[in-house]
Amino acid sequence: MTLFEGRNLDCRRGGRDVFAGLSFELPAGGALLLTGANGSGKSSLLRMLAGLLRPAAGAILWDGESIAEDPGAHAARLHYLGHLDAVKPVLSVRENLRFWAGLRQAAVGGGAGDDGAGAKDAGPDRLEAALDHFALGELTDVPGRLLSAGQRRRLALARLMANPVALWLLDEPSVGLDHASVGRLTAAIAGHRAGGGSVIVATHTALDLPDAVPLPLDALVPPPLPEMIW
């Protein structure tokens, strides 16, 4: 059964048509893999699906309802991980994770629930499990400014597990990760899907995503406008 759906989406940025006529269906527990060359619109699509960017045309639906009808409810049901890790340099690893978990709970009104409409409570055990999963246990007291690029990325990924929600939108999540950390990422995605969560990933790196449905954006480039003759 379709949970998340895009219908005939068009994207226009800076006066340029990026893609047109994009449609997809994503069930609970499903995975969608966005592929395409740089500039094909993968990041723009993820921002659109997160409610951060309006489509030039088309509709985005959650359980049959437009996400535009209740942006707050849509924000509460998803994690969006972009290119920036958003690690606070003066806070320790544990403080960073606790800060983001608390900020998210405040944003959704402390939303506790497991129906995908809001985040579950991020208790101490859940925070510690997220840190351990991404091998950050020995770095919990290290300030963010002293972390390597890969360590910052693992801390950003730990936020996904600290507050479980229904939908993960991941933009190049494996950038900066070593082989072992990529394995931790794919394991986290597998656990999320096993619990009924859905994921949409844009990546140039091969990730082990069983049964993921590919969505090649290169095939959706709109035709060029006809040349104007004056």
Image (cartoon, rainbow, N blue to C red):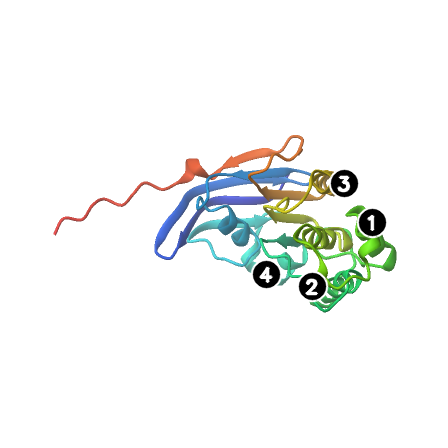
Mark 4 or mark 2, whichever is nearer to me = 2
**Residue 59, horizontal then vertical, whole percent:** 49, 50
189 with respect to 46 (left or right): right
Res. 140 mark: none
Residue 152, quarter of the rendered image: bottom right
Q: Which residue bears the numbered disc 2?
A: 145
**Residue 22, horizontal then vertical, whole percent:** 46, 42
**Residue 126 visible in the snapshot:** no
**Foreground pick, 222 / 185:** 185
Residue at 64% from the left image edge and 35% from the top image edge: 207
Task: Please tell me how crowded label 4 is: few (under 14), some (14-19), or many (20+) other residues with Cα within 10 Å.
Answer: few
| Quarter in which the N terminus is drawn | top right
Res. 71 mark: 4
**Residue 5, horizontal then vertical, whole percent:** 56, 44
* Type of the residue with mark 1: Asp
Mark 3 or 2, nearer chain start:
2
